[in-house]
Image (tube, helix red, strand yellow):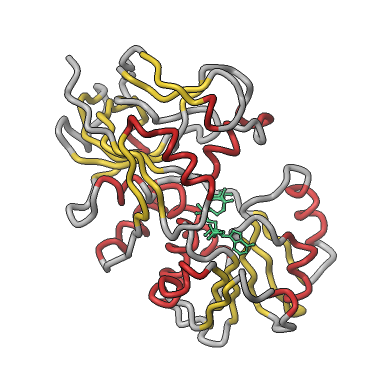
Amino acid sequence: MKAIVYQKFGNTEVLQIAEQVKPIITSDQVLIRIKAFSINPMDWKIRRGDMKLMSGSKFPKNTGADFAGIIENTGDSVGHLKVGDEVFGVVKNLMKEGVSAEYVAVPASLVWKKPDKISFAQAASLPVVGTAAVTAFEKMGNITSQTKILINGATGGFGMILLQLLKQRGAQITAVTSPKGIEYAKKWGASTVIDYTKEDVLSQKITYDIVVDLSGKMGYKAAKEIMKTRSIFINPTPEPVEIPLAVLGNIFRSKKHIVLLSNPATAYTEVLLDEVSKGLDIGINAKFPFSQYKEAYQYAEKGGYVGKVVIEINNPVIK
Ligand SMILES: NC(=O)c1ccc[n+]([C@@H]2O[C@H](COP(=O)([O-])OP(=O)(O)OC[C@H]3O[C@@H](n4cnc5c(N)ncnc54)[C@H](OP(=O)(O)O)[C@@H]3O)[C@@H](O)[C@H]2O)c1
């Protein structure tokens, strides 16, 4: 089978197509013929070697963590899924495994039936950013119509889901985005939108109960300036050293630095599937065919779009 792999850390030029052996499943796994997989910033952070401590340096590496496809085979102990089911899911080890291939073998516990109302591309876009959004939402605690929340970088994959979860709680949401995201941020739930190419949210002297930085560019030190005395900063892009420092520092300060590390699991997916049934909008900005994998990653890494970027595979059944 064909797979997108890389043999060393680097930019998109290290990506290549290689022939790999079709995976053999264990009793708790399912074999999936991939129809689509989504691109996440984590993919290029790992590929560039920024996360070596967690990803390890063993090559070749595949890329991509969340996917949708069709079940080809099931292990002996798998009861709830059968051959032919349309499903979506995620790899077990986000740092070390990848789904950029015609087939993947994954634990059945990380695979869920795809609702008919969403496409393979939309389903493939849900596990990583959806889990992160549900986790961030849980960390916010009690939210009322008086809670003022700032989401910086609000119209990427993560922000798109988080905005919609928060909208239902009636919080006062300020979204920071680029001009392309303004209409989407309003549609998904923001009451105020700031265009970061024109205004600097840090110099506005407005304070918030919760600040979430999805751009990876704000940092706790800067965020403190726009936090109320008892408020939280949610940071899903910490430097490794920040993780213990945040926990220790929080013992002494009232402006809390909350590091977010999320891991997809059925409990989160159940929340997301419930949201899908209620009409969650999963915005796909661009879909690339498997053969245009380099263009897909170049496009995604450049930024400047709203929602998710997905690679689709129209692969025949391989016997
Ligand atoms: N820790 C975890 O468990 C976890 C899980 C999922 C994701 N993450 C991380 O969370 C972050 C967001 O994920 P994502 O999938 O939503 O990524 P994304 O789709 O790339 O979204 C990031 C957003 O930030 C915006 N942005 C860039 N520069 C900005 C600036 N100066 N000010 C305000 N906004 C700016 C981008 O807008 P433009 O492109 O228009 O510039 C983009 O919409 C990523 O770093 C990702 O790695 C962490």
Farthest residue to the right: give it. 252
Instruction: State which image quarter holds ligand 1.
Output: bottom right
Q: Is 197 located above or below residue 18 in the figure?
A: below
Q: Nearer the viewer, residue 116 or 312?
A: 312
In the picture provided, is 258 more to the left or to the right than 189?
A: right
Q: Is 282 located above or below residue 124 in the figure?
A: below
Identify the residue shown where x is 54% and y is 68%: 177
Identify the residue shown where x is 73% and y is 74%: 202
Q: Nearer the viewer, residue 289 or 313?
A: 289
Q: x%, y% of residue 301? A: 53, 45
Identify the residue shown where x is 60% and y is 81%: 148
Q: x%, y% of residue 277? A: 25, 63
Q: x%, y% of residue 70? A: 21, 34
Q: x%, y% of residue 71? A: 21, 31
Q: Is 163 located above or below residue 258 in the figure?
A: below
Identify the residue shown where x is 16% and y is 30%: 83
In the picture provided, is 31 more to the left or to the right than 229?
A: left
Give the quadrant of residue 24.
top left
In the picture provided, is 274 more to the left or to the right than 63?
A: left
The quadrant of the picture occupied by the C terminus is top left
In the rendered picture of this protein, how many numbered marks are placed on residues?
Answer: 0
Q: Is 150 located above or below residue 118 in the figure?
A: below
The quadrant of the picture occupied by the N terminus is top left
Farthest residue to the left: give it. 84
